[in-house]
Image: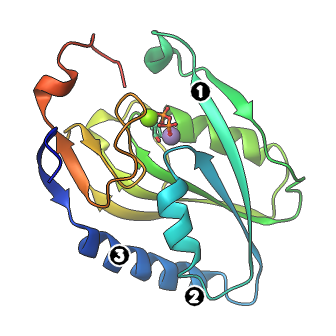
Amino acid sequence: MHGDMERVLITEEEIARRVRELGEEISRDYAGKELLVVGILKGAVIFMADLVRCLTIPVRLDFMAVSSYGASSESSGVVRILKDLEQNIEGLDVLIVEDIVDTGLTLNYLRENLLTRGPASLKICTLLDKPSRRKVDVQVDYNGFVIPDEFVVGYGLDYDGRYRHLRDILVLKREVYSGKKEGDN
Ligand code: PRP
Ligand code: MN
Ligand code: MG
């Protein structure tokens, strides 16, 4: 295990098994349809890459990048689009793929924003759900794991841009991030 890590929370094998299950469930639900999968950069990329290869329906991919505004972002809920979709989603079946729902502000914003564009349907798939941190209600349609309120990295999730490439989901040692002020991530 990486020296900055406290422990493994979810192993590579557990993730792979759950991702396959999600892929089967999504493929069943969208049988006969084509799905536009929207990955939210950067955290979702690893999960998205694995998930879409477990789908047995026709799929297209697109990406968005968003950023929360400044230090008060968590309470304000203001989200800025850094990179928008490349296609018009009107009339399409759209699935947002995220790595984690924390406060819910990011997904709440994305959901409202994409709904204004008139998709045929819009659903949300997240690998991790940390309900203890929720500030706004978000209806998640597909969820991999509910996790406790710990600082997790790996499988796409970062601390200060690092550790996204690690294959397990791990709890970061407190000493690695304790120098930072509250709310940083
Ligand atoms: C993280 C994570 C989600 C979001 C969840 O992204 O990947 O997108 O925060 O937090 P919320 O529910 O409180 O809104 P981050 O902003 O760290 O960007 P990243 O994906 O590039 O790491
Ligand atoms: Mn993210
Ligand atoms: Mg991040």
Label 3 or label 2, whichever comes before in sequence order: 3
Residue 106, numbered circle? none
Which of the two marks, 3 or 2, is nearer to us in this view?
3
Is residue 147 visible in the rendered structure shown here?
A: no
Check disc 1 and report its element: helix, strand or loop. strand
Give the residue drawn at x 88%, y 64%: 91
Residue 67, numbered circle? 1
For mark 3, does the 10 Å Cα neighbourhood hold few (<14), some (14 to 19), or many (20 or more) residues?
some
The image quarter in which residue 183 lies: top left
Q: Are marks 3 and 1 in contact (CB under 8 Å)?
A: no
Q: Which residue is mark 2?
A: 28
Q: Which residue is mark 3?
A: 16
Q: Position of residue 41 (x, y in %)?
A: 59, 44
Q: Position of residue 25 (x, y in %)?
A: 49, 82
Q: Is residue 12 left or right of residue 42?
A: left
Q: Is residue 21 left or right of residue 65?
A: left
The amino acid on which the numbered mark 3 sits, given as a three-letter code, is Ala
The amino acid on which the numbered mark 1 sits, given as a three-letter code, is Ser
The amino acid on which the numbered mark 2 sits, given as a three-letter code, is Arg
